């Protein structure tokens, strides 16, 4: 039977394991111990179903992630120094950068 990704997402783990049991694709090896998100990925691969993938458009995600990493280091320093105003500033910057990535995700 042909399934869509939406149909598979609505099924329980037990139902997904029954579908995996009927197939002997290499991606489904060890299906009995897989979690739902792993089963969905493996089943979509074995049944040739296009799996959803989100991309960031219009931003340099790597550069923003590097900025976040630097800010997290500054946040840790502010926590150690008990500087609440600096901590608040850094946390807000991290939040804004994460929201920027989230909004650019398609």
Image (cartoon, grey):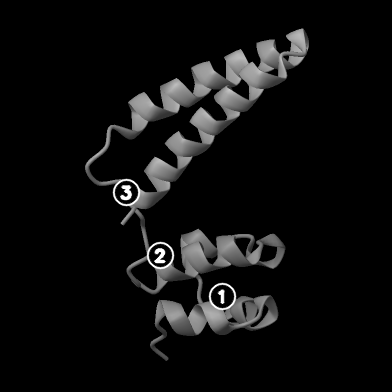
In the rendered image of this protein, does residue 34 appear above or below residue 4? above
Which label was assigned to residue 101? none
Q: Quadrant of residue 76?
A: top right
Q: CA distance from mark 1 to mark 2?
A: 11 Å
Q: Which residue is mark 1?
A: 20
Q: Percent x, y for residue 67?
A: 43, 21
Front-lying residue, 25 or 36? 36
Q: Quadrant of the N terminus?
A: bottom left
Task: State the SS at label 2.
Answer: helix
Q: Please give the name of the residue rendered at 57% of the width and 66% of the height, measured from the top-left corner.
A: 39
Q: Nearer the viewer, mark 3 or mark 2?
A: 3
Q: Count numbered badges in the picture.
A: 3
Q: Which residue is mark 2?
A: 45
Q: CA distance from mark 3 to mark 1?
A: 35 Å
Q: Percent x, y for residue 41?
A: 48, 63
Q: Percent x, y for residue 78?
A: 68, 13
Image marks 3 and 2: residues in contact by CB distance under 8 Å: no
Q: Percent x, y for residue 36?
A: 62, 67
- Judge from the rendering whether residue 33 lies leftward or rightward of residue 104; answer left or right: right
Task: State the SS at label 1.
Answer: helix
In the rendered image of this protein, does residue 2 appear above or below residue 92? below
Mark nearer the N terminus (3 vs 2): 2
Q: Quadrant of the C terminus?
A: bottom left
Q: In the orientation shown, which residue stands out farthest toward the front?
A: 85
Front-lying residue, 31 or 97? 97
Q: Which residue is mark 3?
A: 104
């Amino acid at each position: 039977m042909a399934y869509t990704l939406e149909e598979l997402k609505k099924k329980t783990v037990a139902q997904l394991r029954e579908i995996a049991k009927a197939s002997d694709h290499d991606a489904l090896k060890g299906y009995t111990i897989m979690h739902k998100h792993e089963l969905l990925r493996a089943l979509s691969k074995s049944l040739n179903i296009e799996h959803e993938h989100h991309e960031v458009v219009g931003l340099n995600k790597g550069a923003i992630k590097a900025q976040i990493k630097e800010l997290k280091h500054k946040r840790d320093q502010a926590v150690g120094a008990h500087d609440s105003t600096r901590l608040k500033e850094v946390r807000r910057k991290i939040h804004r950068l994460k929201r920027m990535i989230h909004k650019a995700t398609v």
